[in-house]
Amino acid sequence: KHSVNRKEWNLRVSVKAKALVLYGYEGVKARIYERLEAMGATVMQESIGRVDLCVDLMLPGFELQPENIISPAQSTQSDHGDMNVHRRARRVDSITLGKMPGRQICIYNKRREAKIKRNLHWFDVWGLDRDENSSENPVWRVEIRAGKRYLSEQLNVKTWAELDAVLPDFVKMTMEAYRIIGIKTGQNVSRWATHEFWHEAHSRLMAITNGELCGIVPGRIVSGKRRVLQETYETLIVGLAASLSEVCQTDDVPTLAQTLAQKINNAALNQSDWNRRRQRAKRRLSITDEFYQQEHHA
């Protein structure tokens, strides 16, 4: 809306982890403003509502165990909430500490989640075979989150500049306040050694705040999404063909397949109509940036 009243703001931007993998923190910020400008939006002032930073790690032999997590000594239920543990087949699959809109840490098996939710492009990012046994080689995502209340009350953050100034400190404070420990020695918790998994997560999260990129090119994710969509549509076509055979009361599958192939060929002969259908699919699927660039930057 054309209004200077903050209550009248009506644009909210949410960034997915995939975009951050591809373009990094600074790159994503630049792309946000490019797209807002292309939409004709007038950006008067930003207000950061939530910040999530995450890294994905594989460490052979590592198991997530609630008893090995150390929380801040001053934690209270109102500040950090109870530990939420999710198990699958007797193994801990995820642990969440804290509550939004405060500060929160979530450690979970991203490999399993990617398979369940069919976000299979992550396997291209990791360079892993999605058909391998995920229970033996999990990919653990360590995600630290700052909600609106924590940003405003604890970090005094509303703008990009304020966020940039405190982001490294936020990572450091959070990763030092919560720890995963290795071997417990003695009664003094502060002397228990931090697990190498947590050291690695801390180091990589700090690298994000320093602007380091993952080195993943967009083509790897796009090709992965295309492959998943291809498999999905092929499965749908087979299912529809089986239904059609029942409707036609025929078990002559080769003839049915030949008839369908001929119908597809006939439809494709009308090139303008076929291209129009493909363009509609391209807009609907949105698996590349090409449509956006053609429509808004021509």
Image (tube, helix red, strand yellow):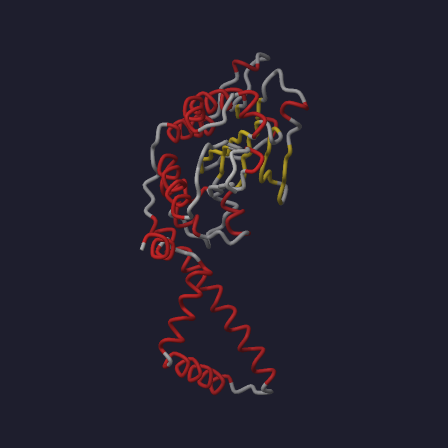
Q: Nearer the viewer, residue 141 or 165?
A: 165
Q: Nearer the viewer, residue 276 or 186?
A: 276
**Residue at 49% over, 37% down:** 141
Residue 57 visible at all:
no
**Residue at 49% over, 50% down:** 133
Image x and y of residue 200, in percent:
42, 29
Image x and y of residue 139, in percent:
47, 41
Q: Nearer the viewer, residue 139 or 23?
A: 23
Query: If the image is split into quadrants, where does the C terminus sit?
Result: bottom left
Q: Could you tell whether 236 is left or right of 30 in the image?
A: right
Image x and y of residue 103, in percent:
57, 27
Eyeballing the image, is 252 above or below 161?
A: below
Eyeballing the image, is 276 above or below 130?
A: below
Residue 162 visible at all:
yes
**Residue at 42% over, 84% down:** 262
Locate residue 150: give its quadrant.
Answer: top right
> How many marks on residues?
0
Image x and y of residue 168, in percent:
42, 23
